[in-house]
Amino acid sequence: MRKTLLESLTHGSLTEPAPAPDESALAELATKVGRTAQARLGRSLAIREVDAGSCNACELEIHALSNAFYDVERFGLRFVASPRHADVLLVTGPVTKNMRQALERTYNATPDPKWVVAVGGCAVDGGIFRGSYACVGGVSETVPVDLHIKGCPPSPMDLLKGLLALLEHVGAKR
Amino acid sequence: MGILDSIPYVNAVLSHRPWPRAVVTETGWKAAIDRLVEGGLTLLGFWGEPAAVHMALLDDGSAEIAVVTYACTAGTFPSVASRHRPALRLERTIHDLFGLVPTAADDLRPWLDHHAWGKPYPLSGRNTSRDARPYRFLPAEGEALHQVAVGPVHAGIIEPGHFRFTANGEHVARLEQWLGYTHKGIESLMQGASLEAAAKLANRTSGDSAVAYAFAFARAAEAALDVEVPQRATWLRALMAELERLANHLGDIGAICNDASFALMHAQTGILRERCLRAANVAFGHRLMMDVIVPGGVTRDIAPDGVSALRALLTELRKVFPRLIELYDNTASLQDRTVTTGIVKADYVRRFGAGGYVGRASGRDFDARRTLAYAPYDQLSFEVPVLDAGDVNARVWIRIREVEQSVELIEQILGRLGPAELLTALPSGIGRGACEGMALAEAFRGDVLVWLRLDGELRVERCHLRDASWFQWPLLETAIEGNIIADFPLCNKSFNCSYSGADL
């Protein structure tokens, strides 16, 4: 164990430079996030991930955000275990009808001010599951959405760009 | 002796490939159940249609497979689950989706149907009603017992499902799962879909096994159409399948250790997993390699710099991974959590036909790559690790050994990629009416089964996808019994069952 730890210390860092915030995400946020209470949060956001029926590919890439290459925590972005601790809900999936109520309850359990980020093609409009008897469709048909991050699944870099845009936007309102 | 020699049947369906399918009467259906109960056969799949039910059966000894079909003329069929428990969730699903009633069933609670779809029996083609009663969990009685309800929204970044624990102090007396939250109606979306659209759905049945699903789906369609795939496409398919296995096993090994509070391993395997996905992206243009495998072959060749990216990955893995194995093996505090925790009995994995590391860690020597030897694994040399302990530790070791095997397999495949042909053109239609195909592929967590029927214009008439998780989830309920609640995340992660794959 000592060898592995020491090597991690002496080796250069794997963590990559931060990407620029996504321009289209900034544009979407500029029109949608208009609340005044944002100022209190500063440059730190607690994120609660909610799988509303995804195929689990989005979850894999959201997980990757915490690995050494992306290290999302360096930006003040943290994943938390409860919606009651969260500022941001990161929602994936075409919102299955079996998950709709749980998503609504999770949203209601999240204190204001809060943001909802819909992640992945399914979360935008149901994606390839659109039209099924078992799916509601996009996340915005169940709870208000502030930002969409597209992709099937979006890469960790796409996710990071979107989340940095959100962070920037929240920070700018201070 | 063939499976159908011991099961009386009315007629064999000639358009079903590559294994036989036979229509049986009640006598034949019950004979098949008898064979399952005796342990002579393993239930490989169990699915419905508006007026029929099918069972896929495996003879573990001879690796033979057959499908038996019972026509539900009165909307009923003799219950399988009342005599053979591994069929229970599948039987409840058949009832939920098609409204067919298993006669003499002792448990017909809804499984996928949470009374939220707005219509009952969505694939039955009939307009009927169903009582919307609150879900009844099985009772557990005794002094000092209390219940803990967890989910569907969990604390981590994982899929949704509900776990109902009945505990005596810290110890779990009973766990009951209730899933179905991610039910998307994939099999209904498949109906009438083109092969192209259906393959996309198959890729997204369980995203972590996108390649394995695409592989199984393509092979089922190719079996139905009797189409041969170019050699190079077959190699590329296996290359992607092994890359997918590597990435998932590496992620799992770290995540299991992380659930035992050993973050160092998680950090290290997280780096290796990311390297796998990046190499996959260079080689095939998508980190999870979605939509590359299609019926007929593959949509693209490996990128020019893909081979060197994969060789660099193998070099890195050979350098770093042995040290991580040593780290796992020599950390007593970690072993203290994984050894003897969450034991799955050998008898259960045999009866349930549990595949993947869950089965192989408890002595079930089955791997579709070797047992069924589908192309190109019939031309590759590899070992299938099997252990007997059945605990979390054994499931970690199976993964470790499989990582080593996948590294060797990728090396073998890279040396063999032949001429550049990638895709066999499919016929635009078939004159002779419907055709049926079935295939299995070994995903990282176990065997995926795909069964489909194509109509004359090559549209999907019916497609059933069966994840390995169907026969693993119930065993997690047995594995946690007598363990402490705090070890549940550890046990659960060592199974890493798919929610989406089993909810469909």
Image (cartoon, coloured by chain):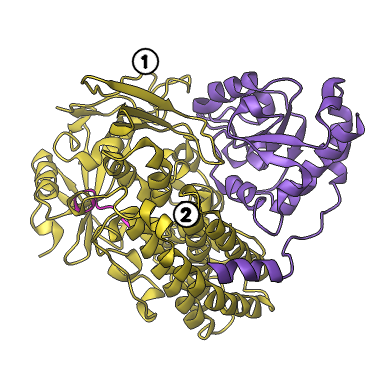
Chain colours: A purple, B yellow
Mark 1 vs mark 2: same chain? Answer: yes
Q: Position of residue A145 (x, y in %)?
A: 73, 28
Instruction: State the residue in front, B426 or A33.
Output: A33
Answer few, some or many: residues within 10 Å of disc 2's Cα (few below 14, many 20 plus, some between 14 and 19). Answer: many
Residue where numbered disc 2 is placed: B257
Q: Which residues are magenta?
A: B349-356
Residue at left offset 51%, top offset 53%? B208
Q: Position of residue B260 (x, y in %)?
A: 45, 49
When the figure is inspected, residue A104 is found, relative to residue B58, above or below; the finding is: above
Q: Main secondary structure of the magenta part?
A: helix
Identify the image quadrant of residue B385: bottom left
Residue at left offset 39%, top offset 80%? B380
- Chain of the residue under the numbered disc 2 shown in the image: B
Residue B134: mark? 1
Q: Helix, strand or loop at disc 2?
A: helix
Instruction: State the residue in front, A24 or B219.
Output: A24
Residue at left offset 26%, top offset 50%? B344
Residue B188: mark? none
- Chain of the residue under the numbered disc 1 shown in the image: B
Instruction: State the residue in front, A36 or B33.
Output: A36
Label 1, label 2: how far apart the Cα atoms are = 38 Å
In terms of sequence position, does the residue under pointer 1 or pointer 2 come before the other? 1
Q: Position of residue B49 (x, y in %)?
A: 33, 38
Task: Indicate whether residue B422 is drawn in magenta.
Answer: no
Q: Position of residue A5 (x, y in %)?
A: 60, 66
Instruction: Say whether residue B268 is left or right of residue B42.
Output: right
Question: Could you tell me the amino acid type at mark 2?
Answer: Cys
